Amino acid sequence: MKKLGLVFVFILSIASLFGDAKSVRTESFTVQAGFGEVMEVYITEIPAQGSSFLEGMPFNIEDDIVKFNAGGRGRTIAYIDIIANTNCRIYVKADNLKWSPGPTGETAANPPELGYKLNFDYQVSYINTSNEAVYSDRDIGFSIDSGGAEQYADLFSGGNRFPESEYKTFISVNNGMISFMFDSETTSKIHNDPTSVPVGLYKGDVTVRLEAM
């Protein structure tokens, strides 16, 4: 499938119009536009420092918010944005977190891999044939587990096909949230057997892709 996309980034500078400018403030925003067959996904990681360490990465694996909680969503670590002109599926492949030495050069023998869940929460919108903006009835969400095969969910309504007879232009997701929490086994290990979890950094790769239905 041919994919074409067009993204503009504008940088606006604002300064005093009178006298010498004593300060300059710069703002930026992104304009999205598409042409032809388009399926694009954007993941924006949230830096913990920019959110007073209340969300984003890195984080302390002992924090209560990343403990397993049935029905909970965990810690928000990134935003997801999607633009497409056809219904599609979101495929996610998440590797377990693996230990690596910290900045002080720690060592560890046979460190465990840490399993976790990623929760995706977003709302789908589109323009129908009456030029009206239509939104999904409620936040659509799905969860995936790390350490296994690639998993997927339909973009629109978690298994219900997008009403292609109704839409006129692109469907989109804006500022959907990706949240993290450990699975129950890893949570128990961290909090009940902490000596089995060596000091250091833990990293895991996550791949997100779209595929037309």
Image (cartoon, rainbow, N blue to C red):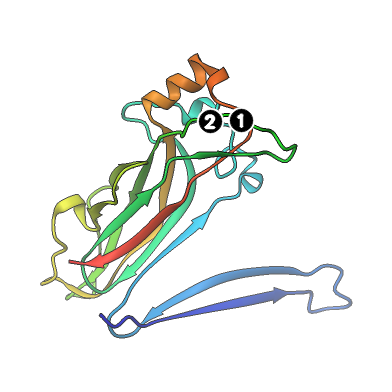
Q: Residue at x 61, y 30 (%)?
A: 108
The disc labelled 1 sits on which kind of residue? Ala
Q: Residue furthest top?
A: 192
Task: Identify the residue shown where x is 28% and y is 45%.
Answer: 142
Tell me the residue at 50%/22% (across/down).
Answer: 190
Residue 127 at x, y percent in the picture: 25, 71
Q: Mark on residue 108?
A: 1
Determine crowd level at label 1: few under 14, some 14-19, many 20+ residues with C-alpha closer than 10 A: some
Q: Residue furthest front?
A: 109
C-alpha distance separating marks 1 and 2: 6 Å
- Estimate how packed mark 2 is, as few (under 14), some (14 to 19) or many (20 or more) residues with alpha carbons within 10 Å: some
Mark 1 vs 2: CB contact within 8 A:
yes
Q: Which mark is residue 111?
A: 2
- Quadrant for residue 83, please give it: bottom left
Quadrant (top left/top right/bottom left/bottom right) for the N terminus: bottom left
Q: Is residue 108 left or right of residue 39?
A: right
